[in-house]
Image (tube, helix red, strand yellow):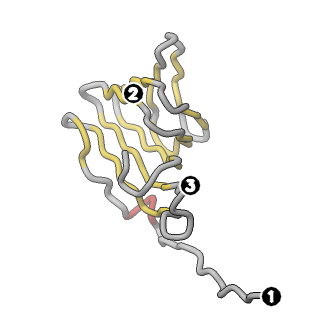
Amino acid sequence: MSSAAPLKMGYIAKAQQEYEPPLIANENAFLGDVLSSEKHAPETPISMGFYRLMAGTPLVYKYTYDEMKIMLEGHMDITDETGQTVHAVPGDVLYFPKGATITFTTKTYGLACYTGQRKRDGA
């Protein structure tokens, strides 16, 4: 019988308040991974981070992986290819399946935390 070494948890203090995700698209869409399981689960990694959208150009994104988001602050209008639109507010949870094309817009500001079935910085 082999004895596996204990595994250390990941921890980022005050991430929601202090982490500034980088600009990824247009003038108003910011996204950045904070933690990933890639080191311990290279075949099935999950990555977690923050997505912030400011008023401006809508972001149209085609998912190449499954993702879930929880709205933390502000609001976003989120539309899928079927025409379903959700006005997401803090506490709302969303699931985006691999292959879906989603449009994100806001008239003010929105911040969400996401977990995606992908490697770190693989968005």
Whether 78 is drawn above or below 5: the answer is above
Query: If you read the primary sequence from the N terminus, does the residue marked by circle 1 or circle 3 appear first?
Result: 1
Q: Amino acid at mark 2?
A: Phe
Frontmost residue, 102 versus 70 = 102
Left or right, 92 with reference to 112: right
Q: Which mark is residue 104?
A: 2
Q: Which mark is residue 44?
A: 3
Left or right, 28 with reference to 71: left
Left or right, 73 with reference to 103: right
Q: CA distance from mark 2 to mark 1?
A: 51 Å
Q: Quadrant of the N terminus?
A: bottom right
Q: x, y percentage for residue 94?
A: 58, 34
Query: If you read the primary sequence from the N terminus, does the residue marked by circle 2 or circle 3 appear first?
Result: 3
Q: Amino acid at mark 1?
A: Met
Q: x, y percentage for residue 31?
A: 34, 47
Left or right, 30 with reference to 88: left
Q: Which mark is residue 1?
A: 1
Q: x, y percentage for residue 111?
A: 43, 44
Q: CA distance from mark 2 to mark 3?
A: 27 Å
Can you tell which of label 2 and label 3 is closer to the viewer? 3
Q: Which mark is residue 72?
A: none
Q: Quadrant of the C terminus?
A: top left
Can you tell which of label 1 and label 3 is closer to the viewer? 1
Whether 54 is drawn above or below 72: the answer is above
Query: Dot 1, crowdedness within 10 Å: few (<14), some or many (≥20)?
Result: few
Label 2 sits on a secondary structure element that is: strand
Label 3 sits on a secondary structure element that is: loop
Quarter assignment of residue 28: top left
The residue located at (30%, 45%) in the rendering is 30
Whether 77 is drawn above or below 75: the answer is above
Query: Dot 3, crowdedness within 10 Å: few (<14), some or many (≥20)?
Result: few
The residue located at (26%, 43%) in the rendering is 24
